[in-house]
Image (cartoon, grey):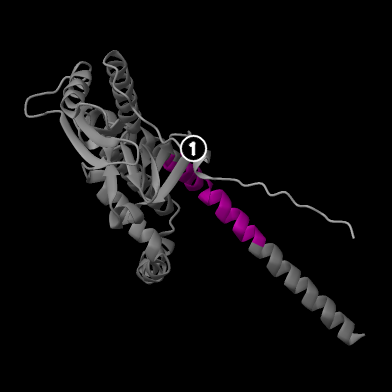
Amino acid sequence: MISLLIKNFDLSKTFEKVVEKMYGWGESIILKLPNFILAIIVFTIFWYAAKYVSTFIKNVVLKKVSQESIKVILGRTSSIIITLIGFFTALAILDLDQVLTSVLAGAGVVGLAVGLALQGTLHNTFSGFILSFLPNIQIGDWIVSNGHEGQVTDINLRNVTIKEADNNLVAIPNSKIIDAPFKNYSATKRSRITITCGVGYESNLEDVKKITIQAIAGIFKQKPQEEIEFFYTAFGDSSINYMIRFWTDATGKREILEAQSNGIMAIKTAYNSHAINIPFPIRTLDFGKNKFQSETITIQKA
């Protein structure tokens, strides 16, 4: 009986402590509620301010900067910084200074561990900053890199996104582009186009050269210090092969293909007018060299 009374007393005492603790929490929540609401409001203001500041930096502060990738990276960086300032300000309003101090104190150790674990990601991040400030690659350029070819649509802190000719997107890590060669068709406004062809052995090579150069010059105007180059390259199996090179405005693969197509059509039209033959391989079967003999077999009956 006595032990039962002792147990009931302990349970009632424990319940009183729980109620007292919950009452204290409720009182603290009520007292902290204005600060909590204020912290949410402040963080929300900083959140929207980050977006407007990012847009302001890209469209106003960096208006005269022609390189779009610089605008994008600096805009995103400013947005992240302002958002972090708002987060730490909200913690200070909630009187979580000790938590903030602990976070900053542990940032060094955590940063070291994260840095070792995410070496590849950090490499891509720093490479993204480098690419953003490089004039050799910009948004809208047509590049070839790591076996992929297309137009640059985005440069961020992780990868470069290109849209290939089939309209599919390919994300290439920044470190891959930094560490490997890449070709940028848009880096120069003028490109040299090469067309290869062949003419029959019966052709007058001087006339072929003159007519071909005239056909190209008629549709592609060469600027000063530019010229149309014509070279015979080889005696082929059925033709004498040559290549012709000329300059035209081209900042992407599409313009290069169009120039090659127009050049081929102009050459074919000129050859038709002057009866110049463009031969193709022909296989001749001569059965006259094969003498078939028929033998008569006589079967004698016993």
Q: Is residue 186 left or right of residue 34?
A: left
Q: Give the residue displayed 45% in from the left and 45% down from the top.
A: 39
- Residue 35 screen position, x and y as percent: 47, 47
Q: Quadrant of the C terminus?
A: bottom right
Q: Nearer the viewer, residue 122 or 171?
A: 171
The answer to whether residue 240 is visible is: yes
Question: Residue 29: within the magenta?
Answer: yes
The quarter of the displayed image where residue 82 is located:
top left
Q: Quadrant of the N terminus?
A: bottom right
Label 1 crowd (10 A; few <14 / some 14-19 / many >=20)? few
- Residue 122 screen position, x and y as percent: 36, 60
Q: Give the residue displayed 27% in from the left and 37% down from the top.
A: 241
Name the residue at the front extreme.
302
Q: Nearer the viewer, residue 149 or 70?
A: 149
Q: Which residue is mark 1?
A: 168
The residue range painted magenta reads 22-43
Q: Is residue 48 left or right of residue 221?
A: right
Name the residue at the bottom extreme.
2
Q: Is residue 38 left or right of residue 249?
A: right
- Residue 31 screen position, x and y as percent: 53, 50
Determine the main secondary structure of the stretch shown in magenta: helix
Q: Nearer the viewer, residue 181 or 66?
A: 181
Above or below residue 215? Residue 299 is: below
The answer to whether residue 66 is visible is: no
Question: Residue 250: within the magenta?
Answer: no
